[in-house]
Amino acid sequence: MVKSEAYGHGLVEVARVLAQEGVYGFGVSEPEEALRLRRAGLALPILLLSGFERDWLPEICQLRLIPAVASLGMLEAAAAFTRRKGLSLEIHLKLETGMHRLGLAPEELPRALKILADHPQLRVTGLMSHLAAAENPEDPLTQEQVARFGKLTKHLLVQGLSGVRFFHLANSAGIIFLRGAGGNLVRPGLSLYGAYPSFRARAYVRLKPVMTLKARVLEVKEVRPGEAVGYGPLYRACKRERLALVPVGYDDGYPRSLSQKGFAVLRGQRVPLRGAVSMRALTLEVTALDPPVRPGEEVILLGGAQEEVPADELAQLAGTISYELFCRLGRSLKRHFKPLPKN
């Protein structure tokens, strides 16, 4: 899954590495992402995951995309367009199994089969669905979705749907907890980037973070007991304290909700975030560090070679999920790419 700028990590750069590692193909959300991959010379299959709008069909065909067809309206639009243009189109049918977001409902399948029978230029090569709570494998909804997917795929094959090669249901959590949920294709997303879909997943697999967010201390100052720090003020010094100003804020994608909650790592030690995160700055208390911190020293705000600032821990403090942290920070800040270390 390289949608949303590869979760903020860099669409083309990540896709090139994954292609070298032998993946089947890529998952994107919109044709613009696929266009960038094709222009970069990547010829592997590209699955358009989240359905499509009618006016995307010319690009879908031109870029040789495999759209996930998630409604009768999409199926009818694809059938009409490809018939009119004399084109063939490979598609995956997305089935509704309990998430109630995108997918063909069971009662819509007879109509879908009729459309497909009347339009042989639409070639169904995959059946798919999406898990709503795979990080909780014992959840009745998860078990129900896995069972429904198996039942629906079997029904479609019995009804004569031919040419299906791929069955896929599992996201990162589904891969970790459900062993792929019985499919022969899986859709790793968050786990590709070294983050865990839940704290519980740490007991099952060891992942290495791909993204590290670093900055340098801009200024260091001392405050006396009772003096205010930043907007609000949300914080007043409890003692004589040294504070390090770091030029990263919510304009850069660093969540304001981490005000008074977040932390960073400086010289290998955790230091707390004091006061409010502002538009282009945050403040860390570095009183305990000796010798005193100086401007220019490096601070780890996310990730790190030893996972000094775990994404899931920071996301929990921010009241969000690591997906959002990656997307926000990766899109806003300048990225530097390093080659994979050789084994």
Image: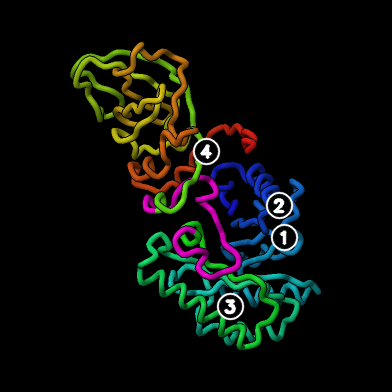
Indicate the secondary structure of the residue bearing disc 2. Answer: helix
Mark 2–mark 1 CB contact (< 8 Å): yes
Mark 3: which amino acid? Leu
How has the structure been colored for display? rainbow
Say if the magenta span includes residue 178. Answer: yes
Indicate the secondary structure of the residue bearing disc 3. Answer: helix
Q: Position of residue 28 (x, y in %)?
A: 61, 56
Q: Which residue is disc 1 drawn over?
A: 59
Query: What's the CA distance linking mark 3 and mark 4?
Result: 40 Å
What residue is at 30 percent from the left and 16 percent from the top?
Answer: 242
Query: What's the CA distance linking mark 3 and mark 1?
Result: 20 Å
Residue closest to the eye, 45 or 329: 45
Say if the magenta span includes residue 339. Answer: no
Query: What's the CA distance linking mark 2 and mark 3?
Result: 26 Å
Mark 4: which amino acid? Met
Indicate the secondary structure of the residue bearing disc 1. Answer: helix
Q: Which residue is disc 2 drawn over?
A: 35
Q: State the extent of the magenta-drawn residues as a range.
A: 176-200
Image position of 127 (left or right of 181): right
Q: Which residue is disc 3 drawn over?
A: 72
